[in-house]
Image: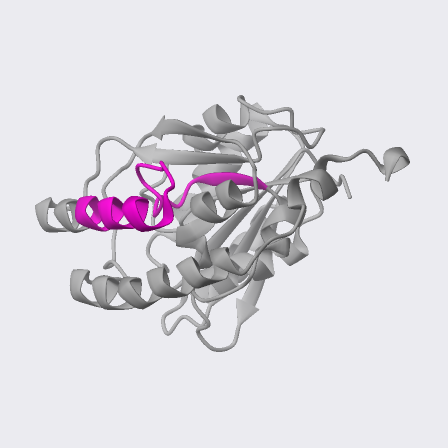
Amino acid sequence: MQAGKLSIVIPVHNEAGNIGAVIGEAVGVFSAAFGDFRIIAVEDGSTDDTWDRLAELEGQYPQLTAIRHPERAGKSAALRTGFLAAKTLWVATMDGDGQDDPRSVVDMASRLDLTALAAPALVCGCRTNRTDGANRKWASKIGNGIRRAMLRDNCPDTACGLKLIPRDLFLALPFFDSLHRYLPPFTRHLGFDQIYVDVVNRARMSGETKYTNVGRAFAGFFDLMGVNWLMRRTHIPAKELLFTPEGER
């Protein structure tokens, strides 16, 4: 499975104005930090020139693999496509709008041994200086509080796009449209340890956010009901299966 030190999956939708700077900065930072790495950018049904830009960037940077969804399938589906294409034990995720600093990925990865599967099994970025405006901040604060109360996870910022998780663990989780927002409670439910790392949140370089407070709240209510049901109905020895050495199975 190990083909490089780390894979970084970047889901992208309508980010033609940002993706060139995002990939260029990421390649520079990760080349210095990891040497051997792979960026997998998954273009999710964009209606602008994002795919054309990615195709150009793929020719420019040998570390980049670009994959296209012909129709929009959502962020979690784009992440799943990227994880399926990854060949490393560990995979990092970051957004394609320029708000995530790739140096935060380096900081998060420093808390792990990327050559082995060992606890913790999830490293979550937590944005301490969110740049989204007061309304978004308050909406996220309320949503995080409700989620923690219902699902009993202690992640202060589950929606942050910066995460590190074993490839096989992500692909073993029940898949649904908003899975990326519920990695902390699902992994905790299955018995895995987590750590939280403060990360930098920057202003969007161009374009507009893909989410609204009303839309997020409406979808989030039903997601919480569904996730609560899935957790109650999911009982597998995932921790032992993932971390038991091959020779002891």
**Horizontally, is 6 left or right of 116 in the view?**
left
Residue at x 31%, y 43% (from the top left corner): 99
Find residue 247 and report its image quarter.
top right
Residue 178 makes an appearance in the image: no
Find residue 68 and report its image quarter.
bottom right
Residue at x 48%, y 51% (from the top left corner): 10
**Horizontally, is 24 left or right of 112 in the view?**
left
The magenta stretch spans residue 143: yes
The magenta stretch spans residue 39: no
Residue 219 makes an appearance in the image: yes
Q: Position of residue 177 (x, y in %)?
A: 44, 66
Q: Is 50 rendered above or below residue 4?
A: below
Q: Where is residue 3 in the image (x, y as percent from the top left)?
A: 75, 41
Q: Which of 34 and 18 is in front in this view?
A: 34
The residue range painted magenta reads 140-165
Residue at x 67%, y 33% (from the top left corner): 5
Q: Which of 180 and 62 is in front in this view?
A: 180
Q: What is the residue that sits farthest to the left in this orientation?
A: 134
Q: Which of 69 and 24 is in front in this view?
A: 69
Q: Where is residue 67 in the image (x, y as percent from the top left)?
A: 58, 63
Question: Which image quadrant: the C terminus?
Answer: top right
Question: Which image quadrant: the N terminus?
Answer: top right
Residue at x 57%, y 35% (from the top left corner): 121
**Horizontally, is 125 left or right of 106 in the view?**
left
**Horizontally, is 7 left or right of 200 in the view?**
right
Q: Position of residue 31 (x, y in %)?
A: 58, 30
Find residue 175 and report its image quarter.
bottom right
